[in-house]
Image: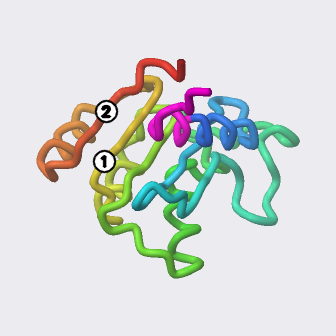
Amino acid sequence: MKRIPWDQYFMAQSLLLSLRSTCTRLTVGATIVRDKRIIAGGYNGSVTGDLHCIDEGCYIVDGHCLRTIHAEMNAILQCAKFGVGTENAEIYVTHFPCLQCTKMILQAGIKKIHYLEDYHNDPYAIKLIEQAHVQCQKSHTLK
């Protein structure tokens, strides 16, 4: 029996996490990995204790849902909350990170971004990724 490659395994974890998303606009999952070990996972949803988009609808201002914390942010904050370092880690995300998440990823010291789907890929985010010499790789399939 042949095992799936690590990249597919970690991206599959992100797809699974995305099924927990509570924002109806886009379901996103993120998995942070260091030394081939999962150190955190996140999905887009509301602040703990707040209402969820799936229950109350999105809270839209200027085209953005303010109720939602993005998957990447949730995963990075989970590391901060539990004191887990992210320096030289990799992140697997179901969708290309937004500009704000890109900035957090870079500040967290994550050195490689894997993503499955393009989603409003911000030119400045791309510039920052290149400037920081962070590898950014689009996964083409899970098969």
Q: How many marks?
A: 2
Residue nearest the viewer, comparing 9 with 44: 9
List x then y, in percent, for residue 79.
52, 70
List x then y, in percent, for residue 47.
70, 61
Task: Find disc 2 in the rendering and name its residue.
Answer: 137
* Left or right side of 86 for 23: right
Q: At x 49% / y 75%, what residue is drawn? A: 84
* Left or right side of 30 for 68: right
Q: Which residues are magenta?
A: 1-11
Q: At x 49% / y 63%, what residue is drawn? A: 76
Which residue sits furthest front?
Answer: 1
Q: Considering only vertical position in the picture, is 108 above or below 141?
A: below
Residue 112, label in figure:
1
Helix, strand or loop at label 1? It is strand
Amino acid tagged 1? Lys
Helix, strand or loop at label 2? It is strand
